[in-house]
Image: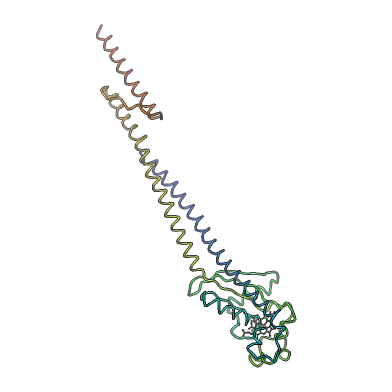
Amino acid sequence: MKLRAKFNLMLGVVFSIGLGFSGYLSYTQLNENARNEVLGNAGVLMESLLAARTWAVKEVGPNLRETEDDEFLMMGVPPYVANKLMEDVKKRYPEFGYREVALNPMNPKDHPADWEAKIVDQFRSQPDYKEHWGIRQTPTGPMLYLARPINIPSSGCLGCHSKPENAPAHLVKEYGSSAGFGWKLKEIVGAQIVSVPMAIPIANAQRMFITFMGALSGVFLVLFVLLDVMLVRLIIKPLGAMAQAANEISKGNLEISEFNESGKDEVAYLAVSFNRMRRSLVKALAMFNRTSGAK
Ligand code: HEC
């Protein structure tokens, strides 16, 4: 194998490994960043909805009177307030989702789907487990979900969720008395689940990945061509010429022109030595011819 082929092969292997390694690292890092960004958005949304719930429970609920009209009384119902808020958020971010599910819900639409029920079960079996997140494939693309357990922190909740006879009349009239009751203090009854789409951050991460890899491949390609040209000009060409000259000399042809001696690198040094060797050889031969002619 020729020097140039060996060198280029080695460069090719090193560049491919470098490209593969940086590709893997940047791909995982960019995807992780995209996921963290979405998780951050989900966290902010969750906190805002929690704040709305707390406000409903602490500030609004205690100040409402049964004499007020039904719609106004709903302002004291935490999921009602959170869902109302979410309706506005969805006007701007239609793919975002929020659910408050319970295993025994007052509103049948809050019945958990299979995957949601699993999360609630997990929260119920591990009371120390405070947050759960994951990614689900949906028809509209991957969605990141963030879930937190809903427990019954105070007896205030039981005013509506313990027994139908204790609950406000308008509530029983609206929702019936069969479900959403019998909850106990400190019991984990369900979960809050925020869903945020991942399609756009993933597409952004992919675009960044392609740009980065394109730029890196470009740099490697330029480097490859540059190193190849330098190798040919600085080493392979002068060495080849010297090898050819040595070949000529070995055949007895000493009439070859001198090599360019400019420069301070090893090849220039070799050219100087080569020229000197050729001149010595010429002199030695002339001397030899003279002495052998004198005989
Ligand atoms: C004023 C009565 C009232 C109070 C107080 C109340 N809730 Fe509810 N709760 C409701 C009603 C009504 C619904 C159904 C809302 C709907 O239609 O989405 C509901 C729904 C829920 C849901 C959604 C699942 C379901 O049953 O539909 C959860 C979870 C929940 N409440 C938890 C709580 C917690 C925790 C507290 C205390 C911090 C609380 N609630 C206090 C009346 C109340």
As drawn, is 173 to the left or to the right of 253? right
Q: Quadrant of residue 164?
A: bottom right
Position above or below: 39 against 159: above
Tell which of 67 and 176 is nearer to you.
Answer: 67
Quarter of the N terminus within the rendering: top left
Which color scheme does this rendered protein use? Answer: rainbow
Ligand 1, image quadrant it occupies: bottom right
Residue projecting furthest to the top: 295
Give the image location of residue 48, x and y in percent: 62, 73
Position above or below: 232 against 247: below
Position above or below: 210 against 8: below
Give the image location of residue 156, x and y in percent: 73, 82
Residue projecting furthest to the left: 293
Q: Residue drawn at (67%, 85%), measured in percent from left and top?
A: 180
Q: Residue drawn at (46%, 62%), measured in percent from left and top?
A: 206
Count of number-bearing discs: 0
Q: Quadrant of residue 84?
A: bottom right
As drawn, is 193 to the left or to the right of 140? right
Position above or below: 8 against 284: below
As drawn, is 54 to the left or to the right of 202? right
Tell which of 249 and 191 is nearer to you.
Answer: 191
Quarter of the C terminus within the rendering: top left
